[in-house]
Each structure stands twice: as structure tokens, then as C-alpha cells.
């Protein structure tokens, strides 16, 4: 009984400690708020995003390190011993981020006017991959028999149980690991998703982004509730999945942690629409594709 009471007191004490942290994230040079910055812990998969004014609310977790990151800025790490009830975070810009963009824009080869859609083309929406807030799903897309092409659009088939915000990503392929590598910068790449099934068509023709036979990872990240009233991971939208005759390269990650390869396969058919690959094995992939001009 005494041990039980001690356990209750320790739990209560930890939960008192894990409260009342707020913060604001700004650009260190110009002082503007940084919206949609990722605020998460290094060990535990728990995180939030800053709102349009750079504000966030989050719990303090003992014996962990808080990480603040945003595209184009130096990552900040704060040990739990240095956390307080209110944090003023100033992030320094990464000046070399633009060099990564130029790598994809400096293509002298002429591009024709033919267009094709490549990626996962299935329209079957009977199976879903969970896309919980803070999670990114990336699908590898490789053009076949093309030396180079220009990406003119990204297309996603998704479903959400409520209005939410999602962020579109493109990553090159890491030459050493084959995982998603450096991010290909996209401006204004946050989209509001309505409740229910949605088809997103994100146009890129004016950004002059090119890929070759090495391929590219197209990805979608759930930022959570669109009205910013939710400060914890309670939103639960879903990625619509489709079927493929062979296993694709799919990776997931929480916030900006390490990528993990994702592959669902099972032997029991849940639907008559499922396509068979091998002896009773089924693969499920996100319904992502790109439009390529070549």
C-alpha cells in the first residue's frame, strides 16, 4: 500500500512538472514570428507546431531535450533543466539554404511539352494509413526512361475526419542511404484540408523544379487542427492509401526525427477490391503522384 501511494505521488509530481510551458518563436534578425515551426522532444514522440504568431503551448518533460526547428533556420536544442514556463526563442537563418534550391533550378537542358503522371496512380480508397499530427509520410517516385523532367504538379488523395492543415514536401534521394535527403524548398506549401475525402492538386510549374532518373520523394505532413485551438496531438486525420502490385519505398518520421521505412503487408484480404501480389500478400501505399513535363 505504501509503495502504491509513493507511486501515485511520483506520478502526480511528474504531471505537475509537465505543465505550463508557453513560448514564442521569432526570426533573430528581423524579429518576425516563425509560423509552423516544429517544437518537439528528442526522445519522446511528442510535439506541437507554432501558430501564425509564432506562439506555442506545450508540456515540460523531465530528462529530455526540447528541439525547435524550422525550414531555413538553425535548429535549437534546450535541455529540460533549462526550460521555464515561458520561452522566447530566436532562430538564426541558414543562409546556405538557398543554395539547395539553386541545385534544382540550374538545368540547361530544354524541356518539352509532354506531360505524364507518375507515382501511385490507384484510385482505390478502401484502406487508410494513419496520418497523425506531426507525422510525415514520403513516397519515392522515379521517372522511367526519362533523363530529366520538370515537376509541374503534386497530387494527393487523402481523407480527414476534420478540417486540418497539411504541409507539402519534396525531398531528393540521399545517395548513401536511399532515404529522403535534403528538402527541395517550396514556398507557401501549406494547404487547408476539408473534412472528408480530398484531392489536392499543388501546382509547381513556376518554381522550375527538375528531377532525373534518381527520382524524388514526395511527402505530406499533418500540422493538425486548422483553427490552432488544439495544442496537443489529439487530431487524427488519415492518409488515403491505394494498392500497388509491388512494394514501394515509403518512409515516415515524427517531426524532424530520423526516417523509418514503412511497409504494410498481410495475408488476410479485407476487401474484394484488394490486388494480390504473391501468395496472399497485399501492399498498401499512399495515394501520391507527380505530374512531370519532359
Image (tube, grey):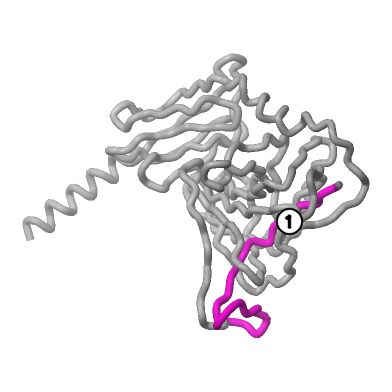
Residue 79 sits in which quadrant? top left
Residue sitting at 28 percent across and 42 percent down? 16
Q: In the figure, 17 relative to 119: above or below?
A: above
Q: In the figure, 40 relative to 288: above or below?
A: above
Q: In the figure, 134 relative to 72: above or below?
A: below
Residue sitting at 84 percent across and 41 percent down? 205
Question: Considering depth in this image, is 76 or 151 the residue closer to the camera?
Answer: 151
Q: Position of residue 262 (x, y in %)?
A: 52, 59
Most distant residue in the bottom direction: 272
Question: Considering depth in this image, is 124 or 118 the residue closer to the camera?
Answer: 118
- Quarter of the figure with the N terminus: bottom left
Q: Is residue 225 left or right of residue 106?
A: left
Q: Position of residue 78 (x, y in %)?
A: 38, 28
Residue 162 sits in which quadrant? bottom right
Q: Can residue 227 be seen at all in this image of the molecule?
A: yes
Q: Position of residue 93 (x, y in %)?
A: 58, 21
Q: Which residues make up the magenta segment?
A: 270-293
Q: Which residue is mark 1?
A: 289
Q: In the figure, 285 relative to 184: above or below?
A: below
Residue sitting at 40 percent across and 40 percent down? 41
Secondary element at image label 1: strand
Q: Is residue 210 left or right of residue 269?
A: right
Question: Considering depth in this image, is 71 or 174 the residue closer to the camera?
Answer: 174
Q: Can residue 161 be seen at all in this image of the molecule?
A: no
Count how many numbered circles sit on residues in the image: 1
Amino acid at each position: 500500500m505504501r509503495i502504491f501511494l509513493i507511486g501515485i505521488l511520483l506520478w502526480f509530481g511528474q504531471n505537475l512538472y509537465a505543465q505550463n510551458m508557453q513560448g514564442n518563436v521569432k526570426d533573430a534578425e528581423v524579429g518576425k514570428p516563425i509560423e509552423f515551426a516544429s517544437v518537439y522532444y528528442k526522445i519522446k514522440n511528442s510535439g506541437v507546431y507554432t501558430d501564425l504568431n509564432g506562439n506555442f503551448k506545450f508540456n515540460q518533460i523531465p530528462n529530455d531535450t526540447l528541439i525547435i526547428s524550422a525550414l531555413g533556420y538553425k535548429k535549437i536544442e534546450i535541455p529540460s533543466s533549462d526550460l521555464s514556463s515561458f520561452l522566447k526563442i530566436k532562430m538564426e537563418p541558414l543562409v546556405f539554404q538557398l543554395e539547395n534550391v539553386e541545385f534544382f533550378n540550374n538545368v540547361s537542358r530544354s524541356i518539352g511539352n509532354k506531360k505524364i503522371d507518375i507515382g501511385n496512380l490507384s484510385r482505390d480508397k478502401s484502406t487508410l494509413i494513419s496520418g497523425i499530427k506531426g507525422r510525415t509520410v514520403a513516397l519515392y517516385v522515379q521517372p522511367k526512361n526519362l533523363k530529366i523532367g520538370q515537376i509541374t504538379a503534386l497530387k494527393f488523395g487523402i481523407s480527414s475526419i476534420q478540417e486540418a492543415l497539411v504541409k507539402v514536401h519534396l525531398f531528393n534521394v540521399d545517395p548513401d542511404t536511399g532515404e529522403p535527403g535534403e528538402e527541395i524548398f517550396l514556398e507557401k506549401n501549406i494547404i487547408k484540408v476539408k473534412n472528408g475525402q480530398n484531392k489536392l492538386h499543388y501546382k509547381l510549374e513556376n518554381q522550375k523544379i527538375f528531377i532525373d532518373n534518381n527520382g524524388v520523394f514526395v511527402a505530406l505532413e499533418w500540422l493538425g487542427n486548422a483553427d490552432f485551438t488544439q495544442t496537443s496531438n489529439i487530431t487524427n486525420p488519415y492518409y488515403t492509401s491505394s494498392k500497388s502490385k509491388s512494394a514501394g519505398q515509403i518512409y515516415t518520421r515524427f517531426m524532424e526525427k530520423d526516417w523509418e521505412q514503412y511497409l504494410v503487408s498481410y495475408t488476410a484480404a479485407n476487401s474484394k477490391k484488394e490486388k494480390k501480389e504473391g501468395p496472399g500478400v497485399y501492399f498498401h501505399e499512399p495515394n501520391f503522384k507527380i505530374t512531370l513535363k519532359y
